[in-house]
């Protein structure tokens, strides 16, 4: 009898273990599906627009003025550069965001290179070292971002 009880217990335990493994595998699959669906929902839902050639040209010319201003007023030039970049993003259809990382993420879904420029500008704004050099790099990154979003070749001089 003891042997029969032991075999019955092992058989029942084996079946339970198999069901537990199946249940765990099923839960794991459901979690993966939920994660994938959650990531798809997080993708920003906005429609991008192209800028009219005249508007793009105005932004390029404004950047030329910002670069000329930089020598005398680097902080104001960097602030204007940021403002122009944000205006171009808004005009293209990117939503206004308070959190800088969310702006980078929004750009990254559609244009990874533009997102890198914005990230570099934000990083230099808060970085350490020579302030004028950091501001120069900030203006350069915003310029690259604006030129990219307007479809202007980066090596073009206004």
Image: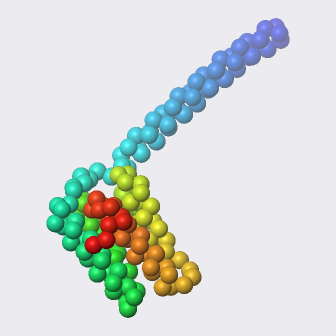
The quadrant the C terminus occupies is bottom left
**What's the colour scheme?**
rainbow
Front one among 46 and 146: 146
Provide residue 117's location: percent of width, then percent of height: 42, 64
Q: Is residue 132 left or right of residue 43?
A: right
- Residue sitting farthest toward the right: 2
Front one among 3 and 31: 31
Provide residue 81's location: percent of width, then percent of height: 34, 76
For residue 35, say whether it is visible.
yes
Provide residue 37's location: percent of width, then percent of height: 40, 40
- In this rendering, the answer to whether 10 lies above or below 137 is above
The residue under the point 56% across, 80% down is: 128
Q: Is residue 77 left or right of residue 9?
A: left
Q: Is residue 62 left or right of residue 32?
A: left
The residue under the point 36% across, 64% down is: 154
Provide residue 113's location: percent of width, then percent of height: 41, 57
- Residue sitting farthest toward the bottom: 72
For residue 126, say whether it is visible.
no
Number of numbered discs overlaid on the protein picture: 0
The residue under the point 40% across, 76% down is: 139
- Quadrant location of residue 38? top left
- Quadrant location of residue 148? bottom left
Front one among 35 and 119: 119
- Quadrant location of residue 54? bottom left
The quadrant the N terminus occupies is top right
Front one among 131 and 104: 131
The residue under the point 24% across, 52% down is: 47
């Amino acid at each position: 009898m003891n042997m029969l009880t032991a075999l019955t217990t092992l058989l029942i335990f084996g079946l339970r273990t198999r069901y537990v493994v199946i249940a765990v595998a099923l839960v794991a699959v459901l979690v993966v599906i939920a994660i994938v669906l959650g990531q798809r929902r997080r993708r920003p839902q906005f429609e991008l627009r192209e800028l009219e050639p005249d508007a793009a040209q105005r932004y390029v010319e404004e950047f030329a003025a910002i670069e000329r201003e930089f020598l005398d007023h680097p902080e104001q030039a960097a602030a204007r550069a940021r403002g122009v970049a944000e205006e171009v993003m808004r005009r293209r259809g990117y939503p206004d965001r308070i959190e800088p990382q969310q702006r980078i993420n929004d750009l990254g879904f559609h244009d990874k290179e533009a997102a890198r420029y914005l990230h570099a500008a934000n990083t230099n704004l808060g970085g350490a070292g020579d302030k004028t050099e950091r501001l120069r790099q900030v203006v350069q990154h915003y310029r690259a971002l604006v030129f990219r979003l307007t479809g202007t070749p980066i090596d073009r001089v206004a």
